């Protein structure tokens, strides 16, 4: 079984939001996963994960010499938290409140197709 992998690092989206889209395509065939992500294109996480899926498919074709990458399965998709940007917003009476800008690392592993 051929496996192909794609890693997207330091993406400016919270892991919680990216995991919602990752759960939709986990275990699906690549063609079906692409259709799901295309239908959910209004979500930022769908566009980001779609790019990673396209990259993993290209890696399978180029590096593993897979003929039909659409038949491969999304074996693993993992969303981990990356570094957090910390900012402050000025508030009333000379105070400030923190703003936390989260980032994600997304790993996509495809399996199948010889």
Image: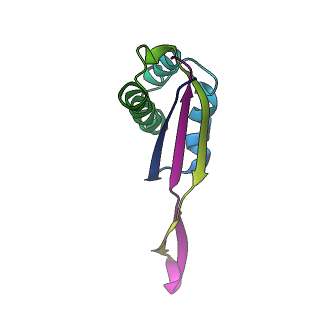
Q: Quadrant of residue 53?
A: top left
Left or right: 97 with respect to 59? right
Pick out the residue farthest to the bottom: 94
The number of numbered discs placed on residues in the rendered structure image is: 0
Q: Nearer the viewer, residue 91 or 100?
A: 100
The chosen color scheme is: rainbow
What residue is at 53 percent from the left and 26 percent from the top?
Answer: 2
For the record, the magenta segment spans 92-114
What residue is at 43 percent from the left and 31 percent from the top?
Answer: 50
Q: Return the x and y of residue 49 as percentages of the image width and height.
A: 47, 35
Q: Quadrant of residue 41?
A: top left
Left or right: 52 with respect to 23? left
Q: Quadrant of the N terminus?
A: top right
Q: Is residue 98 above or below residue 94?
A: above
Q: Is residue 90 above or below residue 73?
A: below
Residue 104 part of the magenta-drawn span:
yes
Magenta segment main secondary structure: strand
Residue 47 part of the magenta-drawn span:
no
Q: Is residue 31 above or below residue 19?
A: above
Q: Return the x and y of residue 23 as percentages of the image width and height.
A: 64, 31
What residue is at 48 percent from the left and 74 percent from the top?
Answer: 88
What residue is at 43 percent from the left and 36 percent from the top?
Answer: 52
Left or right: 41 with respect to 18? left
Q: Is residue 71 above or below residue 41?
A: above
Q: Return the x and y of residue 69 as percentages of the image width and height.
A: 45, 18
């Amino acid at each position: 079984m051929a496996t192909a992998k794609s890693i997207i690092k330091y993406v400016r989206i919270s892991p919680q939001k990216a995991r919602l889209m990752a759960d939709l395509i986990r275990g699906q065939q690549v063609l079906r996963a692409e259709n799901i992500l295309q239908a959910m294109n209004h979500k930022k996480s769908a566009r980001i994960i779609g790019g990673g899926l396209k990259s993993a498919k290209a890696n399978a074709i180029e590096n593993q010499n897979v003929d039909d990458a659409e038949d491969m399965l999304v074996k693993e998709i993992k969303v981990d938290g990356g570094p957090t940007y910390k900012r402050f917003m000025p508030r009333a009476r000379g105070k400030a409140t923190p703003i936390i800008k989260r980032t994600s690392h997304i790993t996509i592993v495809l399996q199948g197709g010889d």
